[in-house]
Image (cartoon, rainbow, N blue to C red):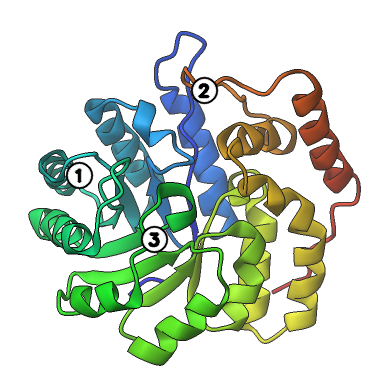
Amino acid sequence: MWQGIFPAVTTKFTAGDTLDIAEMERCFALQVEAGVDGLIVCGSLGEAMALEPDEKIEILKTAKRVAGRRPVLMTVCESSTRRAARAAEAAAAAGADGLMVLPGVPYRSAPHETVPHLLTVTRAAGLPVMIYNNPVAYGVDVTLDMFEMLAAEPLVVAMKESTDDIRRVTDVISCFGDRFDVFTGVDNLALESLMMGATGWVAGLVVAFPRETVAIWRLFRAGRIEEAREIYRWFRPLLDLDVSTNLVQNIKRAEVHAIGSNDRCRAPRLPLAGPEAERVDAIIKAALGVRPALPAI
């Protein structure tokens, strides 16, 4: 159902800590102009836990205005199943094309708790769902046995595979064939995952470098692997910035340098400063200094 590049977009704030709708429209438009295949709002990179429910709906509607016919997925990550179901219903009513659903973090649920949570949220909205599996960050692994149970629900159509184990893509395809659209969710394992059969990439650094991210995907799909690999190798130091506790701050810093945006975050998260800002800036500036020319695709 879904494939290609789906940016997990950042949320933009004004100096007064309100939503910066105009800047989000501009940044989302850069993604669309580069040729991404969908947008995902209010995820981890979108600072979901710091957003109010009405703000999430406003961001969703902003993305829908910009995305055209591309699907826009709302992330649902709540600490209770009841709140998650309400959030899913609200997203459906506001026009979401699908959901990306997480277990009920921060509680580390057991399998017999995780599967009912995911199914309840999915059915509350009645929309196609991508299950976000990130045991590294959230402590809950949606295992193959659990996906076997989820496979009986036709609305569960995809998974965001973020176990940090490249073998999982092969295991999923060996177990389920093409039952699920498999998206890689780890930026610095993206091309490796595509090579092993993933059908898409929920990307982070794409928000600062949309053309390069889309080029890697399109070159891969065209069988031009060496050209894709050349761009990916250039991209790798930047992609490593996604695999960090400070991924939001890192990637917003990349947006500052690459697309002229800002790095404002919502407290308690704060922008990078001091030696850490200098370190990240050096990585970004070094990459920009040798930014590759992209081939015609």
For residue 46, side relative to residue 203 (left or right):
left
- Report the residue at 23% width, 29% height from top: 53
Instruction: Label 2, secondary structure: give it.
Output: loop
- According to the picture, the residue beneath numbered tag 3 turns out to be 133
Q: Earlier in the sequence, mark 1 or mark 3?
A: 1
Nearer-the-camera pick, 36 or 85: 85
The numbered dot on residue 295 is: none
- Report the residue at 52% width, 83% height from top: 197
How would you rate the neighbour count of disc 3 (Cα within 10 Å): few for under 14, some for 14-19, many for 20 or more? many
Q: Are marks 2 and 1 in contact (CB under 8 Å)?
A: no
Looking at the image, is mark 2 or mark 1 nearer the viewer?
2
Nearer-the-camera pick, 267 or 95: 267
Q: Earlier in the sequence, mark 2 or mark 1?
A: 1
The numbered dot on residue 269 is: 2
- Report the residue at 49% width, 27% height from top: 12
Q: Is residue 151 above or below residue 12?
A: below
Q: Which amino acid does label 1 sit on?
A: Ala
Q: Position of residue 295 (x, y in %)?
A: 78, 70
Q: Where is residue 279 in the image (x, y as percent from the top left)?
A: 82, 32
Q: Which amino acid does label 3 sit on?
A: Asn
Q: Which amino acid does label 2 sit on?
A: Arg
Looking at the image, is mark 1 or mark 3 nearer the viewer?
3
Asked which quadrant contains residue 226, the reply is bottom right
Instruction: Label 3, secondary structure: give it.
Output: strand
The numbered dot on residue 91 is: 1
- Report the residue at 46% width, 26% height from top: 22
